[in-house]
């Protein structure tokens, strides 16, 4: 990503978080969690911007590990959409959806955070995978799908850990033994089904972005030819 676009993304997230802080968090609003979740979802995006093939070995692998630890926070924000249930948009008498601008503002805040973090999270995934392949001189045709699928499975497990075990990435640094114990005992058929749901959602999102970009690139190339 060009530096210009990096700053557009960076400033956009900062402005959104300032907006959430001043209008929601500072007033103890119901959706105050959006500030922290959006910030955590942005961290892997920022980390990915610093991961390039020519980075020194220590820097590259340190940032790669940090990105892997924080990446599940990006798709995790999609699960915040369940909080839309608190909006109660229907009129109890008519059963029709009410035209309540405050309700639609909350809807916009939740959707904006979910879309921004998940879509830019997919960009970070694609960027990191491409960087690994370039640095390792591996062929994209085979290794790219393998890495995309593997990292998406890992992130899906991470979403489960964050949503149901309530384990934030930071806990791994403060109490690693307890975190590891929780990770060992969490496995169950129901947990694996949830992970598969999150995997499907992320793969649909990745495929939609990939196909859209690929088809537009083809159309542009055909027009130029």
Image (spheres, grey):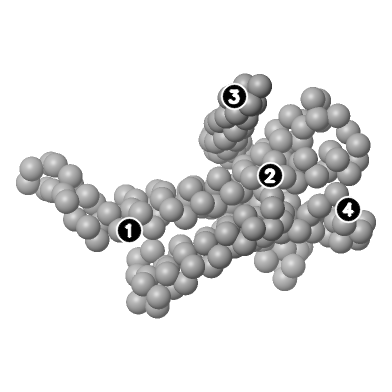
Does label 3 or label 1 sit earlier along the sequence? 1
Instruction: Give the Cα separation between the discs numbered 3 and 2.
Output: 30 Å
Which of pointers 3 and 1 indicates the residue nearer the eye? Answer: 3
Name the outermost residue toward the front: 225
* Residue 190 visible in rendering: no
Q: Residues within 10 Å of mark 1 (few under 14, many from 20)?
A: some
Q: Is residue 149 left or right of residue 136?
A: left
Q: Which residue is mark 3?
A: 223
Closer mark to the observer between disc 3 and disc 4: 3
Q: Secondary structure at mark 4?
A: loop
Give 186 or 141, whichever is nearer the viewer. Answer: 141
For residue 52, the mark is: none
Q: Earlier in the sequence, mark 3 or mark 4?
A: 4
Identity of the residue drawn at 52% across and 62% down: 12
Left or right: 103 in relation to 143: left
Residue corresponding to mark 4 = 54
Q: Residue at x 35, y 54 (%)?
A: 108
- Helix, strand, or loop for circle 1? helix
The percent position of residue 19, horizontal first and vertical second, equals 42, 69
Of label 1 and label 2, which has the lower sequence position? 1
Helix, strand or loop status at disc 2: helix
Q: Are marks 4 and 1 in contact (CB under 8 Å)?
A: no
Give the mark nearer the N terminus: 3 vs 2: 2
Return the residue at label 2.
125
Name the residue tied to disc 1.
106
């Amino acid at each position: 990503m060009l530096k210009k676009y990096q700053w557009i993304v960076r400033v956009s997230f900062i402005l959104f978080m300032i907006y959430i802080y001043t209008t929601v968090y500072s007033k103890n609003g119901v959706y105050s969690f959006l500030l922290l979740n959006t910030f955590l979802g942005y961290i892997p995006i920022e980390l990915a911007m610093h991961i390039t093939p020519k980075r020194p070995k220590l820097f590259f692998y340190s940032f790669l590990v940090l990105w892997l630890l924080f990446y599940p926070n990006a798709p995790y924000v999609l699960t915040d959409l369940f909080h839309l249930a608190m909006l109660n948009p229907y009129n109890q008498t008519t059963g029709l959806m009410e035209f309540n601008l405050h309700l639609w503002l909350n809807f916009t805040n939740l959707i904006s955070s979910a879309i921004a973090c998940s879509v830019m999270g997919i960009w970070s995934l694609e960027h990191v995978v491409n960087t690994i392949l370039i640095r390792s001189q591996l062929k994209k045709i085979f290794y790219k799908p393998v890495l995309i699928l593997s990292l998406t499975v890992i992130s899906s497990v991470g979403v489960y850990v964050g949503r149901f075990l309530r384990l934030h990435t930071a806990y791994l640094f403060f109490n690693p033994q307890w975190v590891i114990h929780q990770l060992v005992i969490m496995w169950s058929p129901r947990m694996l089904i949830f992970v598969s749901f999150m995997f499907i959602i992320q793969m649909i999102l990745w495929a939609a972005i990939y196909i859209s970009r690929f088809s537009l690139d083809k159309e542009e190339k055909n027009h130029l030819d």
